[in-house]
Image: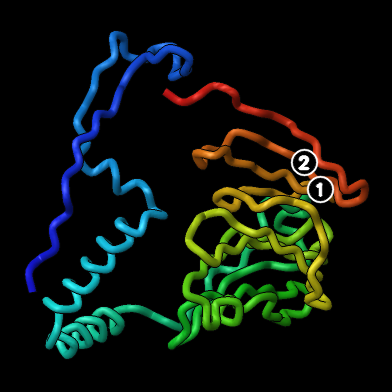
Amino acid sequence: MERPTIKRIPHQVFFGKMDGVFRGENAMFPGIYREDNYFWLRNKESQEVLDVLHKENDYTRFIMNGQESTQNNLYQELLSNVKEDYDSLPLPQSHLKEGWKSKYYYFSRTLTGKSYHLHCRVNMENNEEEILLDENNLAFEKKSFHLKSFRVNEEQKLMSYCVDYNGSENYNLVIQSIKTKENILHSIPNLMYGGYEWYQNSIYYLQGNNENRIHQLWNYDFYTKEHVKIYEETEEPL
């Protein structure tokens, strides 16, 4: 099987100052053009681009055929140097007013044979532990999964986290009751890169533009259900 080749399509990309487009105060002038023969690969929805990726995958499987034993040996050797069952150091969540006097300290746990973390906490008054969230359950039978920004509110009765099921880095914010595990309804939109923080009974969250650049800071009040824009960056990056 021959290695697939990617066709070259001539394309000029312009760098510098352009009429009607703000590219910063120090944009190059006069501008210049540079050749990018693979610019067409940016169209991720194109069937032609998908065909290229499938051919590359087929070629990888072809050249690696018969190497399964070697691959497994290398994997087992690497795994033997990893401690799979591990607890992180229990700490109070940094945004809580109580600080080190917090009733609960939070930590993550990994288990042998499991790919994802368990989020736990320990009651510092009686040393009892509880599992708040098992990422392995959320990831079960999912083709893609990533969880980030696990938080609790000031009263430590609600927990929240951002989850991405398609690799877009556009995360859905989930808020749950710690006691009942029921989801709390809210109207916060998907969060680019999962950026948010609790403050008292509200959430400050970040929004991205069409180019996936963070440019807005919003506040969501749980009592009034109101969204207030705090700041917006209008200048384009250099």
Q: Which amino acid does label 2 sit on?
A: Asn
Instruction: Say which of 4 and 236 sits in front.
Output: 4
Vertical side of 207 occupied by 83: above or below: below
Q: Where is residue 202 in the image (x, y as percent from the top left)?
A: 81, 48
Vertical side of 52 occupied by 29: above or below: above
Whether residue 92 is visible, yes or no, is no
Q: As drawn, is 62 to the left or to the right of 134? A: left
Q: Which amino acid does label 1 sit on?
A: Ser
Of callouts 2 and 1, which one flags the residue occurring earlier in the amino acid sequence? 1
Gap in Å between the C-alphas at discs 2 and 1? 7 Å
Q: As drawn, is 71 to the left or to the right of 154? A: left
Query: Disc 1 marks which residue?
Result: 202
Circle on res. 84: none
Q: In which quarter of the image is the N terminus?
A: bottom left
Mark 1 packing: few (<14 Cα in 10 Å), some, or many (20+)? some
Query: Disc 2 marks which residue?
Result: 219
- Which element is circle 1 on? strand
Whether residue 164 is visible, yes or no, is yes
